[in-house]
Image: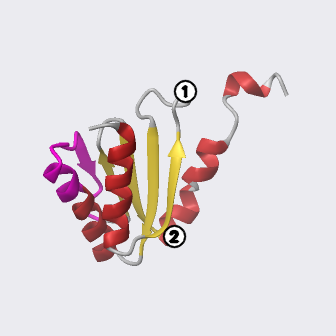
Amino acid sequence: MQLDALTLLVKNALEDLKANDIAVLDVQGLSSVSDVMIIATGNSSRHVKSIADNVVVQAKKQGCLPIGVEGDKDCEWVLVDLGDIVVHVMQQATRDFYQLERLWSMPAMNELGKQ
């Protein structure tokens, strides 16, 4: 599945279950793990689990099998690894604490000396 199509599929799966504050980050060149990172917030542990489960179900329907799912026991932060896309579904307090958007928007270490 092409990256743009998979990104849209994930966004739709998140929106279907009313995920909040969806952020799509292009991390190509910043990460060797994935090209796109998608972050969304759920209102409770049950909501986070339901959102992440829907991402997995919708991806599987399109033939994209997740490489792994982490954090689905406590559901403060569930990570769904779809290869080129990594999806983070978090409760608000967890998202506020880790601030992934800020982390991935910082300049790379090799660029810091050039500023």
Q: Give the tally of numbered discs.
A: 2
Disc 1 marks which residue?
A: 29
Q: Residues within 10 Å of mark 2 (few under 14, many from 20)?
A: few
Residue 67 circle label: none
Q: Nearer the viewer, residue 82 or 75?
A: 82
Residue 72 part of the magenta-drawn span: yes
Mark 2 element type: helix
Mark 1 or mark 2, which has the lower sequence index? 1
Q: Position of residue 15 (x, y in %)?
A: 37, 69
**Residue at 44% over, 62% down:** 40
Q: Nearer the viewer, residue 24 or 108?
A: 24
Q: Position of residue 58 (x, y in %)?
A: 21, 57
**Residue at 58% over, 52% down:** 101
Is there a contact, CB below 8 Å, between mark 1 and mark 2?
A: no
Q: Nearer the viewer, residue 61 or 76?
A: 61
Q: Is residue 56 left or right of residue 43?
A: left
Q: Position of residue 1 (x, y in %)?
A: 26, 38
Q: Residues within 10 Å of mark 1 (few under 14, many from 20)?
A: few
Q: Is residue 113 left or right of residue 2?
A: right
Disc 2 marks which residue?
A: 93
**Residue at 74% over, 25% down:** 111
Q: With respect to residue 14, does 36 lie above or below?
A: above
Q: Quadrant of residue 47?
A: bottom left
Range shown magenta: 56-74
